[in-house]
Image (spheres, coloured by chain):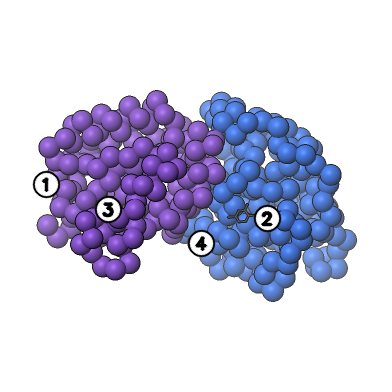
Chain colours: A purple, B blue
Amino acid sequence: MIESDDFVQALQDIGFNFFTGVPDSLLGGIYATLLERRLFTPSVREDEAVAMAAGAYMAGKVPAVLMQNSGLGTSLNTLISLNLIYRQPCLLIVSWRGFEGKDAPEHLVMGQTMTQLLDTVRIPHRALSEQTAADDFRWVAQTFMNARIPLALLIKQGVVKGIQP
Amino acid sequence: MRPEEGTIQSRARAIQAVLGLLTDQPVIICNGFPSREAFKLTDRPTHFYMIGSMGVAAAIGLGVALSKPNKKVVVLDGDGNVLMGMGTLATVGALKPKNFIHVVLDNEVYGSTGNQPTLSRIVRLDQVAKAAGYVHVERVREREDLVYEFKAMLGNDGPSFLLVKVSEQAEDVGRVLHEPAEITRRFMKAIE
Ligand SMILES: Cc1ncc(C[n+]2csc(CCOP(=O)(O)OP(=O)(O)O)c2C)c(N)n1
Ligand SMILES: [Mg+2]
């Protein structure tokens, strides 16, 4: 399992310096580390978080947004009618609830269709794993700089250490 | 004078009054007619014209304000937009960026889609902003009051909320002529 400290450090090393979003239990460790390092700006909705990140980007920051995958639904319009057409990059750190159908009922449809949804709106995505972490972070850095659109790093259960491991 | 008693002005006149008091401050303008009218009245590279993502103008402005604490950031918003993203009033009120000015052009309708009534006729958005924690909250109608209060907000620490009651009248305006990606590029350069 990846330590949340290492996860946040890897993103800081790439240059990420504006973090916002809405919590999910799978992202609890990352969230706690960001709070501890005083890097986190709270938000009340994922579309707000994505828009705040866009403002921060235009003001010179390198932004990332934490969200449960249900928040992709909430922020979809902002992602496609703000970030994608205005060319504003943003790293989406998305928990993959409902992966392989093993989760509470409200997560099953998004868990099953999330990657198709991202493909449909042409948001590049990749699932983080401990074995490929170095490569995954390189992909994040390169895609962010080159594509200038949002990209999603998907976090499955048990990949980054939570609050209760 | 109480806003109810003042003379109502058009949204375009209110926008003109605000833009007339600005120079190089970043301005985020919500989607629909407000952006189109602002573009027609005064086009500056410091303007971020929105053409979609209704409801998040204040959130974009908040991201700019938090990242550029030495610049006053102005958001030109609509009542329908504020109602859609009302949670952001809480985020602004809690984070309290001193350099954030939220101007709401309140015509009590979704003007850009044909004047369907909004709830701002019933719900006092200025009181919502006050309860959420904005530091200065004013509600005006007359142009002179708008100028007076906006100047005060430019000179003082916020976050500030200026509700401007405006008429439903719309200018005959076309679309914003800059490509969205070009709006981002020149806005970033202008506020560097
Ligand atoms: C998510 C979404 N729903 C609906 C619309 C259609 N729409 C565009 S502008 C607008 C009205 C905005 O109202 P307001 O903020 O009060 O500004 P006004 O036009 O009255 O100045 C609406 C409903 C949209 N662009 N996006
Ligand atoms: Mg309106």
The residue depicted at 27 percent of the width and 53 percent of the height is A96
- The amino acid type, in three-letter code, at marker 4 is Gly
Measured in 3D between alpha carbons, the distance from the residue under mark 3 to the one under mark 2, in whole angstroms, is 36 Å
| Closer to us: B79 or B172 | B172
Measured in 3D between alpha carbons, the distance from the residue under mark 3 to the one under mark 1, in whole angstroms, is 16 Å
Secondary structure category for the residue under label 1: loop
Q: Give the quadrant of residue B84.
A: bottom right
Measured in 3D between alpha carbons, the distance from the residue under mark 1 to the one under mark 4, in whole angstroms, is 35 Å
- The amino acid type, in three-letter code, at marker 1 is Met
| Closer to us: B47 or A81 | A81
Q: Position of residue B162 (x, y in %)?
A: 68, 56
Q: Residues within 10 Å of mark 4 (few under 14, many from 20)?
A: some
Residue at the disc numbered 2: B78
Q: Position of residue B120 (x, y in %)?
A: 68, 67
Secondary structure category for the residue under label 3: loop
How many dots with numbers? 4
| Figure check: B25 above or below B84 | above
Residue at the disc numbered 4: B87
Q: Chain of mark 4?
A: B
Residue at the disc numbered 3: A96
* Cβ of mark 2 under 8 A from ligand 1: yes
Question: Is disc 4 on the same chain as disc 1?
Answer: no
| Closer to us: A154 or B37 | A154
